Amino acid sequence: MIRAGLRARVVSGFAAGALALSSTMAFVSYEITRHSLLAEREDTAVRAAYYDASVVRAGITAVNPDLAAVLRALDTGENRRALVLRNGAWYSRNADTGEVVPAALQERVGEGRPAVQRILDDGVPTLVVALPISADTTFYEVDSLAELDHTLRVLTVVLTGVAIATALGGAWLGAYASRYVMRPLVRVADAAQNIVRGGLDARLDPAQEPDLARLTTSFNHMVDELSARLERDRRFAADVSHELRSPLQTLAAAASVLTRRKDSLDDRTATAAGLVADEVSRFQRLVDDLLTLARGDQPAERTAVDVAELARRACRERGLPPGIVHPAGDLIWSVDRRRLNQLLGNLLDNAAAYGGGATAIRLELHGGDGRLEVDDEGPGVRPEDKPVIFDRFVRGGAAHTRGNSDGTGLGLALVAQHAAAHDGSASVLDRPGGGARFRVDLPGCAS
């Protein structure tokens, strides 16, 4: 299950809270208004019914009264109609026969007490007022509440719209609040990303967010400790590598003497001398690579370089056909020549050692950013090795294992470091058709 991000949770929380509050307020407002309007409407209907009942009472005192004529004399308007139940017979101004009057209401008013009941008459809310006039006569007035029902429907729509608008406003407020709250975290993330790219001078200002002073102070202290640790490691690697160069040169000279006199030695001694010379040579390359890594924090010295010709020269030095370089013509980039030359050489050496040799070198420029790709025809890189393939001392098909090659295990680490010096990145992909594709992106290469 994928959990929503912090900003999404804040926005949804504000929206849900605003919707709950506005819905509650809308419901309470609707109920109060509804009860108030219904009570007022019922009072008006009862007063009108009492007045009309008094008119009917006066009309039936005559001998042989004409109830229909008495009812026609009532001013009931369009929303009200009057009914009289006298001696079991219904009288009205039209064809009403009393079916609209509920039996329960008739029973209550039959006890000699006035009664009021709300009903639905053909789906229309209606109020029926029952008033006893005499022992054998009851007056009923049916009052339509259609207009009030329409008003309540409109009120429902309005309050629903207000609730939705309030929820949207809450979501907007949540989005604004989340952006405001997330600003310090965004600055922390930007500073951390800057540190990942090698910018160890990135710091946070505690004065910008006093409430997060502890976080910013701890973050700055962590960066200081990290910077000091990296500087100690760099100095240690540089000092060790530098101190090893003198005895290595002596060993290399002695191995060279043994190699030149190998023909005068017996087979076993000659083989041992060859192994010593090979290991001394590999040790020298390792020391040189460690020194390069130790000095890798220096910025790239960009100049205009024909990278296509640089790639073709690297191919010729390694016995590869220059035709694998694309494009075939000139391509001028603004890069550090020394770094790019070593970067490209390490990729070609890696392809030769682990990928059966390079099959293509592509150089492209996209919107001012350079991209270099080296394809090989080997078995490719396993998915679990891709995240660590550019780490130090990772060689062969598995991470942190020692392969059969005489490489130092620092070649791809140097590739990543040279790319980072250009504010770029290195990655490895699967080549269509099999093999690996090493890609280096170098921003700002347009000369």
Image: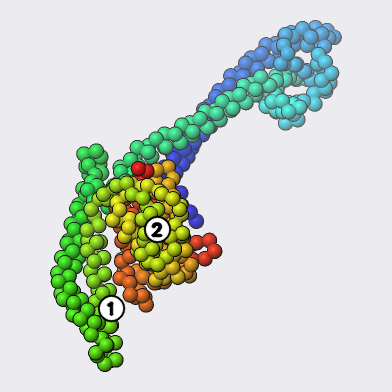
Dot 2: element: helix
301 and 390: which is toward the camera: 301
Q: CA distance from mark 1 to mark 2?
A: 28 Å
Q: Give the crowd class for mark 2: few <14, some 14-19, many >=20 residues within 10 Å.
A: some
257 and 401: which is toward the camera: 257
> Which of disc 2 and disc 1 is earlier in sequence?
1
- For residue 312, the mark is 2
112 and 218: which is toward the camera: 218
Q: Give the crowd class for mark 1: few <14, some 14-19, many >=20 residues within 10 Å.
A: some
Residue 417, above or below 410: above
Horizontal and vertical percent for residue 318?
A: 37, 66
Figure quadrant of the C terminus: top left
Q: Where on the picture, by quarter, is residue 402?
A: bottom left
Dot 1: element: helix
Q: Residue at x 19, y 68 (%)?
A: 241
Q: Marks 1 and 2: which is nearer the front?
A: 2
Q: Is residue 184 visible?
A: yes
Q: Residue at x 36, y 70 (%)?
A: 395
Residue 313, above or below 122: below
Q: Amino acid at mark 1?
A: Asp
Q: Is residue 24 visible?
A: no
Horizontal and vertical percent for residue 92?
A: 81, 16
Residue matched to label 1: 278
